[in-house]
Image (cartoon, helix red, strand yellow):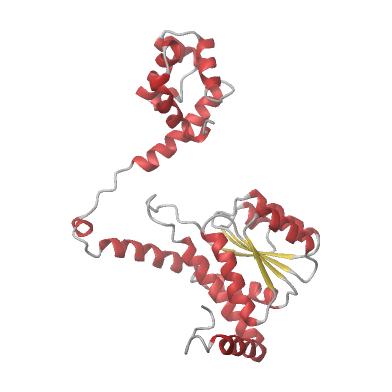
Amino acid sequence: MTALNDILTTIRERAPHEDGVNLKIGEEILRDPASVVDVSIKSFANRIGVSEPSVIRYCRSIGCDGFKEFKKYLTQSLVLEQKFSRPDTPSDADEGGGDERFSRLSGSVAAALRSVSETDHFDRIDAVAKALMGSQTIAAFGLGGSSAVLAMEAQNRLFRLGLHVIAHQDSYMQRMTAATLKKGDTILIISSTGQPATLVDAARIGQTYGATCAVMAPAGSPLARISDLLVPIELATNIPYHQPNPVRYAQMFMLDCIADRIALMIGKPAMETLRRVSSAVSPQQPYLPTGD
């Protein structure tokens, strides 16, 4: 099956097995793929001396409806190609095992934390904390990598305060769980991009039945636009492809801030629950932080 958004890889893999007109077309595309993006099918066909129907047949053979759609996916593939073809030249400190690698990583983490260490964020945290504290049920949702893990972490942090929290990473379970919610319940969604349509669907389902939707996602994203309560966290865009995106540190920090505010708002009942949690694990560990 052709991965259309990585169509250059498909063309390269097919090239050794092509012949005749298809070989000629494929070689011309690979010779200078960027030059193909802005030309008409007529110009492209004339350039290499083939017919326009031959170009269309080639495009269809790799999964596109025609030359126009082929150029769309070629453009996407070129963006991907450029992103991953940039050379990462290590500095002397990198080669010698020095500190530059760590300062680069720690610097990006510090920048992520600074981006959410603002008064406005803490006002929003208070609003989310109040909603969660007053909820009969909290459904924590996330998809993919760090966001899914942090949804589980939300459950880990909040159940210790005596709150009823369920976390799901599966989109079907998220939709079904959202359908069981009602007024007085809250959906907590953590998303690095705020884009997944399945999370938007789950949020809307829960809201239909009266649940409040609290979101950690970039401002202006689809999830942010439908949220009742938003903690805006922007995805870093200038991170090298091989480096994990530091947005998860900002997400974790905001989650810790929310848990801290809830604990202080609940007061003695939360302390009693935490005491019970500590006593339950104390035979195994002389000291175990109640958040870990």
Q: Quadrant of residue 262?
A: bottom right
Point 62% across, 89% down: residue:
276
| Whole-percent x, y for residue 208 in the image | 80, 58
Report whether 15 appears left or right of 207. Answer: left
Give the tally of numbered discs: 0
Q: Is residue 51 above or below residue 64?
A: above
| Whole-percent x, y for residue 225 in the image | 66, 55
**131 and 99: which is toward the camera:** 99
**256 and 124: which is toward the camera:** 256
Image quarter in which the N terminus is found = top right
Q: Is residue 124 above or below residue 30?
A: below
Q: Quadrant of residue 141?
A: bottom right
| Whole-percent x, y for residue 231 in the image | 59, 65
| Whole-percent x, y for residue 44 in the image | 45, 15
Q: Quadrant of residue 246?
A: bottom left
Point 73% across, 72% down: residue:
137
Point 37% across, 51% down: residue:
240
Report whether 9 appears left or right of 210. Answer: left
Point 40% across, 65% down: residue:
109
Report whether 158 appears left or right of 16. Answer: right
Report whether 43 appears left or right of 211. Answer: left
